[in-house]
Image: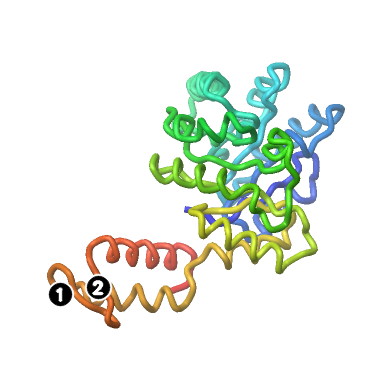
């Protein structure tokens, strides 16, 4: 259960050291786009040393490189029980399978008892169409939308309003929900437009996304707020659950019918409110 995922370049010692201070539910240590080719080795070494000493309170994801010459070196260098999942760029079923095999081998070789998950990064038209099959693969714990590469693949422009990514957002969210994994929305790239970020996050949440990626620490607070239950929702959910204890079957609250699906929704809201310390 997460709301925000903050990208942290794996070649930035200051940001890595302060990963726990930004308030994100998850941090994504990025070995891919954020790191130039000539800095890949140094970034791996920095992250490897970090994991030897630190254990962030946030969930820890690592975005690796999908290129064959870099994927295994990335995994060999930074593999640790501090990692919760690996984000795989330009994912397809075959690449996810290779990554799963590598993770299982490393877990056995290094005697790590936890299972490290996989989050395919959906960055092409083909991957959007395959979202359900990717979400159902062994080891997959979430899906993430990469809108910049997706819109490039589609030969369309990325806009602040986001109409052009409404379909992939919805398809990814549905696939993730159907397979009981998380759906992480693409970052909002204008770090100075707080109102735009709030609107973009709200659109993603309305389509079923469960979390959103951030590319700057200042975006985290807004994302957390948008993806958290609102006070009015918490108050409504509390009343639903209180009345459900005294009522059997369907009942009415504020003139509206309340049945089991509504009760389950209220339970989820309260669970999230407790998780995010809003109660």
In front: 191, or 41? 191
Circle 1 residue:
247
Q: How crowded is mark 2: few (under 14 residues within 10 Å), some or many (20 or more)?
A: few
- Please state the horizontal and vertical placement of residue 3, each as a whole percent of the image: 55, 57
Please say if 24 is above or below 43: below
Give the residue drawn at x 74%, y 36%: 155
Q: Is residue 217 above or below residue 96?
A: below
Marks 2 and 1, how far apart at CA? 12 Å
Residue beneath the point at 67% across and 43% down: 147
Q: Answer with left or right where residue 157 lies relative to residue 5.
A: right
Of the pair 199 and 270, the residue shown nearer to us: 199
Provide the secondary structure element on which disc 2 rests. Answer: strand
Say the numbered circle drawn on residue 256.
none
Q: Is residue 165 above or below residue 22?
A: above
Task: Identify residue for label 2.
Answer: 257
Work out whether mark 2 precedes mark 1 in sequence or the reverse, and give the earlier one: 1
């Amino acid at each position: 259960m997460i709301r925000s995922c903050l990208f942290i370049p794996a070649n930035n010692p200051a940001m890595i050291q302060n990963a726990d201070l930004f308030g994100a539910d998850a941090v994504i240590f990025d070995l891919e786009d954020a790191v130039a080719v000539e800095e890949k080795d140094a970034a791996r070494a920095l992250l490897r040393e970090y994991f030897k000493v630190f254990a962030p309170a946030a969930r820890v994801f690592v975005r690796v490189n999908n290129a064959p010459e870099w994927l295994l070196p990335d995994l060999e260098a930074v593999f640790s029980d501090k990692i919760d999942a690996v984000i795989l760029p330009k994912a397809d079923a075959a690449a996810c399978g290779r990554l799963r095999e590598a993770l299982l081998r490393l877990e056995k070789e290094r005697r790590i008892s936890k299972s490290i998950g996989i989050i395919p990064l959906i960055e092409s038209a083909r991957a959007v169409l395959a979202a359900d099959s990717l979400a159902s693969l062994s080891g997959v714990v979430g899906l993430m939308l990469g809108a910049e590469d997706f819109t490039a693949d589609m030969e369309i422009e990325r806009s602040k309003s986001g109409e052009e990514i409404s379909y992939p957002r919805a398809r990814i969210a549905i696939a993730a929900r159907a397979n009981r994994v998380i759906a992480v929305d693409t970052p909002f790239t204008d770090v100075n437009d707080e109102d735009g970020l709030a609107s973009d996050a709200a659109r993603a949440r309305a389509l079923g996304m469960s979390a959103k990626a951030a590319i700057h620490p200042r975006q985290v607070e807004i994302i957390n707020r948008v993806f958290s239950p609102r006070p009015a929702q918490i108050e409504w959910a509390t009343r639903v659950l209180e009345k459900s204890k005294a009522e059997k079957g369907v009942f009415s609250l504020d003139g509206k019918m309340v049945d089991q699906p509504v009760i389950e929704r209220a339970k989820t809201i309260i669970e999230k409110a407790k998780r995010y310390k809003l109660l």
